[in-house]
Amino acid sequence: MIRCTRHAAVLCGLMFLALLVNATRVQIVQAPELEANPANRRADIARWADPRGDILVDGEPVTGSRDTGRALRWERTYADGPLYAPVTGYASQTYGTSLLESIEDGVLAGTEPALSPFPLWHDLSRGRPAAGQVATTIRAAAQQAAYEGLRGRRGAVAAVEPATGRILALVSSPSYDPGAFAGLGGGTADNWTRLTGAPAQPMLNRAIRQTYPPGSAFKIVTAAAALEAGVVDDADAPTGTPDPYVLPGTSTTLPNAAEGCENASLAYAIQWSCNTVLARLGARVGLRGMVEAATGFGFNDAGLRIPAAVSRSNFDTDMSPDQLALSAIGQFNTTATPLQMAMVSSAVAAGGSLRRPYLVEKTTRADGDPIAHHGPQAYRQAMNPATALELRRLMVRAVEKGTGRRAAIPGAVVGGKTGTAQHGVGNTGTPYAWFISWAQAKDSAQPAVAVAVVVEDAAADRAEISGGGSAAPIARAVMAAVLGAD
């Protein structure tokens, strides 16, 4: 009997050991393969088992969650989806996440460890804290004004607060509704295919991911470089520039769309956007000085994040003199995102100091207790304060007496610069219309907002584009919304 008992015990021990070996094989060796198996829906079911946290604008949610009653229970919803899509991005049960929905996914999905006030508590209890919230820096009125101003035309608007770097508006047009493909059924795949394949590229975030030739809006950078380098001592003095101007080392002449540019001063050139004056000044500053100036404003930075990645704005570091002259007026290979050009205007408005732009004010737990708070950070010193003060004067003059008059706001000080960017083979494409600006309430100590607007499908009338007819009114509406003006 003892012998039988011993054999039975050995057999049971071997069977128990086999079970342990098999469990170890499944849970450790095969776990990655099983987890990655398309048939395994446990992770997705757990991910969508609870409502997702909200993204806030002016303290109000612009996102939500809907109980579907299906296995993937809670589906993402969006209030004014197309309006805020360049800010929120999308959270789809089928296609993943983008922008803030992706970057702040841990907070919004409730998986961020900082959401729990007691470390490891939810790991031990195998639970998950309530999802947190993400408060943005966006101002609803400014966002709405930018969106309505573009009226579905291809283009973008970026607005920042010069003193802090807070992004007040970020609009891309045409836009899309992230809720159209948030779930699993109901035409989700068809909507995704339609949006991703649309010629107008509604899912492209033009405000931070698309670069354009900035055209004459870049002349503010060149003017700063000329003043900083001492190439221009007096902005009101004649510059000795011929009209037309022959590009250095070539027989190619550069014309002007404006009149009176021959021997014009820098002030007049900014007021009426003289190509010849700024091209010649850029060539005189030289490659090194122009590269330093552009870099000071944020060009050539491939690592800028807001926290979403921002495409690199380009100013070439190796050019011939004629190419440099063209680059100095925002042509040749010079390209910029709308956010970058808003940063150019912001640096002027802020006295030469450029703050790092940011989109998230804070992240909080469900009860509002803060997890992280984001504030102003120094980014670049674009120019000295005296240069910035002079450029502010010139930009105000351009609005009050020059090409930017359609951006004027009664009761406010507004500075601006129009831009017309040629593109296409032989510059045959319809020009892009640019306007960069800043605005300050007359009873305020500093400017409250800096804006950049680009309109791709501007009216074909080039004179109207140059006069700020397409982009300047949009910038005015955004600035007025921030200032609370009519």
Image (cartoon, rainbow, N blue to C red):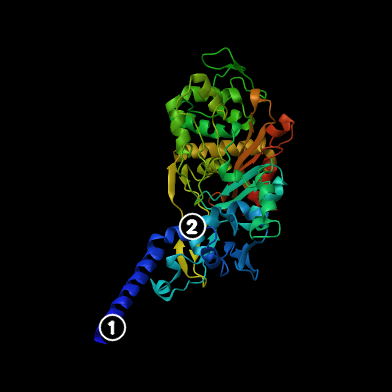
What kind of element bears circle 2? Answer: helix
1 or 2: mark nearer the eye: 1
Examine the rendered structure and indicate whether residue 106 appears above or below residue 212: below
Residue 347 % position (x, y)? 50, 42
Q: CA distance from mark 1 to mark 2?
A: 46 Å
Q: Which residue is nearer to you in this view: 132 or 67?
A: 67
Q: Which residue is nearer to you in this view: 412 or 173?
A: 173
Residue under the point 62% across and 23% down:
261
Residue under the point 69% across and 41% down:
200
Residue 316 visible? The answer is: yes
Q: Amino acid at mark 1?
A: Cys
Examine the rendered structure and indicate whether residue 441 appears above or below residue 372: above
Q: Which residue is mark 2?
A: 36
Q: Amino acid at mark 2?
A: Ala
- The quarter of the picture where the N terminus appears is bottom left
Q: Which residue is nearer to you in this view: 306 or 296?
A: 306
Residue 245 % position (x, y)? 59, 17
Outermost residue to the left: 2
Q: Which residue is mark 1?
A: 4
- Displayed quadrant of residue 341: top right
